Amino acid sequence: MLLDDVVRASADLAATRSRKAKTAVLAEVLRTAGPGELTAAVAFLTGQPAQGRIGAGWRTLAELGAEPATEPALTVADVDAALGEVATTSGSGSATRRAEVLGALLSSATKAEQDFLFRLLTGELRQGALEGVMVDAIAAAAEVPGEVVRRAFMLSGRLPATAEAAMSGGIEALREFRLELGRPVRPMLASPAESLPDALTELSSAVVEYKMDGARIQVHRDGDEVHVYTRTLREITAHVGELAELVRALPCTSVVLDGETLALADDGRPRPFQETMSRFGSTREEQVRALLLRPYFFDCLHLDGTDLLDAPLRERNAALRQVAGEHVIPGQSEPADPDALLTASLAAGHEGVVVKDLESPYAAGRRGRAWLKVKPVHTLDLVVLAAEWGHGRRTGYLSNLHLGARDPDGGAPIMVGKTFKGLTDQLLSWQTERLPELESHRDDWTVHVRPELVVEIELDGVQASSRYAGGVALRFARVVRYRPDKEARDADTIDAVRAMLPSG
């Protein structure tokens, strides 16, 4: 398969907002790719090479000065091999060798292919082949049920591997994927509910638990071996030794637990979220002593050789209480006074409660209606698209943020508003330094950035508006905080924003 085939498919994806059309484009690529090309093709079209980031920025690539080829000749396998060599080259003379490989690669690429490779290698390839659309495409190309593909992806965590299994072995190969200790699964997510009564009406048999303002963790234990992962599946075991020791001491041989962790103040109330997140990158002994993390587990996906993903939450909760004991998050099954739980959670400094269907399986990576979060304050997780230079006392700082909601059909984020409210001096300084590192282009007043940073926005509500493409705009939006624990794929969708429109 020529790289040109992938580039053309990428252009077709960018040219349509239709999920059905995107799925058809991707499915055709999957059917056409040979066995040795499929993994790389899927990786390219989902915006990241199989090797991950290889440390080549836009300036590095531009300085190579490669003249484009006149006719397409590069194959997908050629590109994958070159990137593999760049990723594994190290030691004396490695910088020169990496430049030689990248220069040769770009010299063999046409102008359109060079542009594609530039965007792929710098993280700017956002043409719309997000995970959900690719899952649909794999199902269509392999002629297998979408739910089987989604489950395989949930357990493998890797779309290229999922596509390879589907295209080579069909439904049988996909069903071979199992939960594997030491390999994290995508976390199950909650959807917002208007109120606690609404959530309880929707889920008649439910557990109500505290919703904490902590960082999501997933822990895996196999004997004495323990791994701790973030919600983005990044391993942080080396930074959170106290959590690893706690899990190692639980009364079991093997376990996979889902939960939250947070640092507590002396009075037992949660410290600011940023302080909890600071521990995920620190091994300094003095910071570890000052900010010990406390885990609160709310789900059990595996216990002593038995996988529980498909078991109802009622059974998973029983396993959780058996193994996690005092570390289970506060909550009650079918509580007599759910309002008292919400009041207690808020009084303790937490965000609200989560209402969960006791009969539901663990749907990893999905934001369905089996888990409903109830918070008295409306917030959305949105993507930063740009920032405008400030005026007055904010002169010299990037201030007014352009905010986008995620397109569930795989398109670019959809702008829903702007805000400069809530930005502290510390945040202004931070984003003035950070945003230019993600710059895609700028004009006199605005720096536009790659849609990678997620920011939590508090708002009074939304209103219909013709000003933005999504037909909706935020009302009285203010910045709460940046969310380094989330990626753009975790941001709220335009559908979630529209759902906040007043009815009637």
Image: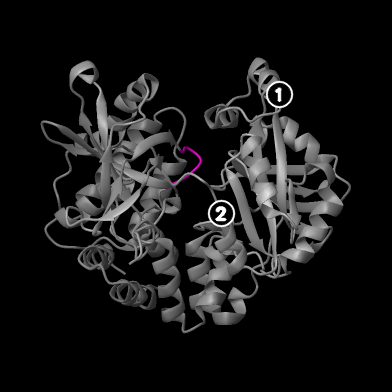
Mark 2 or mark 1, earlier in chain: 1
**Is residue 214 left or right of 418 when viewed as pictured?**
right
In the image, which residues are magenta? 483-487
Give the number of the disc on residue 267.
1
Residue 486 lies in the magenta stretch: yes
- Residue 180 on image: x %, y %: 69, 59
Instruction: Relative to 60, say whether 21 is above or below.
Output: below
Q: Is residue 32 left or right of residue 228?
A: left
Q: Residue furthest right?
A: 251
**Disc 2 marks which amino acid?**
Lys
Q: Position of residue 107 (x, y in %)?
A: 20, 48
* Residue 34 among magenta residues: no
Overall secondary structure of the magenta section: loop
- Within 10 Å of the Cα at label 1, are there few (<14), some (14-19), or many (20+) other Cα atoms? few
What's the residue at 84%, 50% (across, down)? 323
Taking the image as drawn, is residue 482 in sight? yes
Residue marked by disc 2 = 373
Secondary structure at numbered mark 1: loop
Q: CA distance from mark 2 to mark 1?
A: 26 Å
Position of residue 126 relative to residue 314, above or below, is: above
Q: Nearer the viewer, residue 447 or 461?
A: 461
Can residue 303 be seen in the rendering of this structure? Answer: no
Who is closer to the viewer here, 306 or 486? 486
State how many labels appear: 2
